[in-house]
Amino acid sequence: MQVLGLARLLLQQAQAGEWEVLKETDARLARFASQMADKHPQSWAAMATTRAEVRALYQSAITLCQHETDRLKGAWQALNGQREGLAAYDEVQQWQ
C-alpha cells in the first residue's frame, strides 16, 4: 500500500534526522491522502485499518520532529544568552 510506505518512509526520515527530505515526503503523503479521499472515497473509507496505521506512524514522526524542535530551541536560547552576555561585556569594556 503506497500510503503506508510513505508513512514508514516519513518515520525513517524523522529517525535519521533527514528534515528536508522529510518535508517533501510529508507533502507527498498529504497529497496522496487528499487525492484518495477526493477521487476514491469508497476505497479510502475501506482503508480504515491502514489509515489508523498511517496515523500512528505519522504521530511518531511528529513526536520526533517536536523533540528536535525543542532541542534546537534550547540550543538557540543558550546561544542567544551567550550573545547577550558578550554584548554586555563589550559595553563594560567600552566604559573602561
Image (spheres, rainbow, N blue to C red):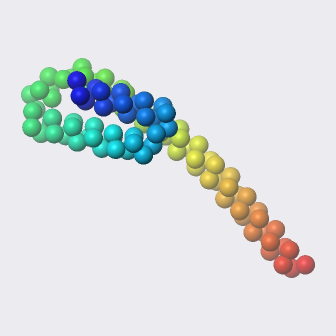
Quadrant of the frame with the N terminus: top left
Rendering coords of residue 49 (x, y %): 24, 20
76 vs 47, left or right, is right
Residue at figure coordinates x 75%, y 69% from the top left: 87
Q: Is residue 6 visible?
A: yes
Is 12 on the left-hand or right-hand side of 84? left
The residue depicted at 42 percent of the width and 46 percent of the height is 20
Q: Residue at x 10, y 32 (%)?
A: 41
State whether residue 17 is above or below residue 55: below
Residue 17 or 76: which is nearer the viewer?
A: 17
Compared across the picture, whether 44 is left or right of 55 comes to left
Q: Given the current orientation, which residue lies at the most extreme bottom position?
A: 95
- Tell me residue 9's x, y (percent): 36, 30
Q: Position of residue 23 (x, y in %)?
A: 38, 44
Residue at position x 62%, y 47% in the image: 74
Is 60 above or below relative to 96? above
The C terminus lies in quadrant? bottom right
Number of residue marks = 0
In depth, the one of 18 and 42 nearer the eye is: 18
